[in-house]
Amino acid sequence: MNRVPMTVEGEKSLREELAHLKSVERPKVIGAIAEAREHGDLKENAEYHAAREQQGFIEGRIRELEHKLSLAQVVDVTAIDHTGKVIFGTTVELINLDTEATVSYKIVGDDEANIKAGKISVNSPIARALIGKEEGEIAAVDTPGGLIEYEISEVQHI
């Protein structure tokens, strides 16, 4: 199976969510099911059906998280020598050559991506255009609005 790249922070976040689901949410929904069973006829018991549905969602998410973590290839970018090259896990400072605006993105795994937090997926068009380039190079990103060129002003291993 294919390994799933993930930062140290991303793995920690998924492990915390998994622990919360197993130790808090799962017991809570099991209790709700037991309580709903006490109310009698299960065919017309809305609380029972809602709790069973919630249990299905929780169990599905637990399986999904366990699967992702089993395939995780955790990359600690702070342990990799800084060469100025854009790789998975680095934070990249970019200058838009048309507008002179600067932006900063951290290249992360798909599950960690959050554009508002400045984290972009390694599979996004901008990350694919940046990977392998070095500080000072120009990266052309094909967007729905047209081609945008960015100069890579800094690559950080943080």
Image (cartoon, grey):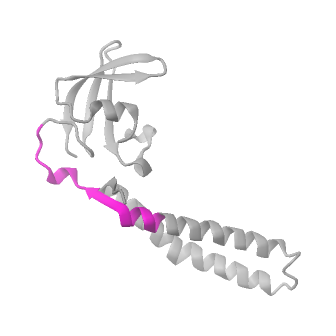
- Residue at 72 percent of width and 80 percent of height: 33
Is residue 105 on the magenta stretch?
no
Foreground residue, 115 or 123?
A: 123
- Residue at 21 percent of width and 35 percent of height: 132
- Number of dots carrying numbers: 0
Q: Is residue 104 visible?
A: no
| Spot occupied by residue 63 in the image (x, y as percentages of width and height) | 51, 69
Q: Farthest front residue?
A: 1
Q: Relative to 47, is 101 above or below?
A: above
- Residue at 26 percent of width and 30 percent of height: 93
Q: Is residue 38 visible?
A: yes
- Residue at 36 percent of width and 24 percent of height: 141
Foreground residue, 101 or 76?
A: 76
Q: Relative to 31, is 16 above or below?
A: above
Residue 31 occupies quadrant: bottom right
| Spot occupied by residue 130 in the image (x, y as percentages of width and height) | 28, 31
Q: Farthest top residue?
A: 98
Q: Could you tell me which quadrant the N terminus lies in?
A: bottom left
Give, as a single range, the part of the protein colored magenta: 65-83
| Spot occupied by residue 80 in the image (x, y as percentages of width and height) | 14, 50
In this picture, residue 66 sits left or right of residue 81: right
| Spot occupied by residue 121 in the image (x, y as percentages of width and height) | 39, 42
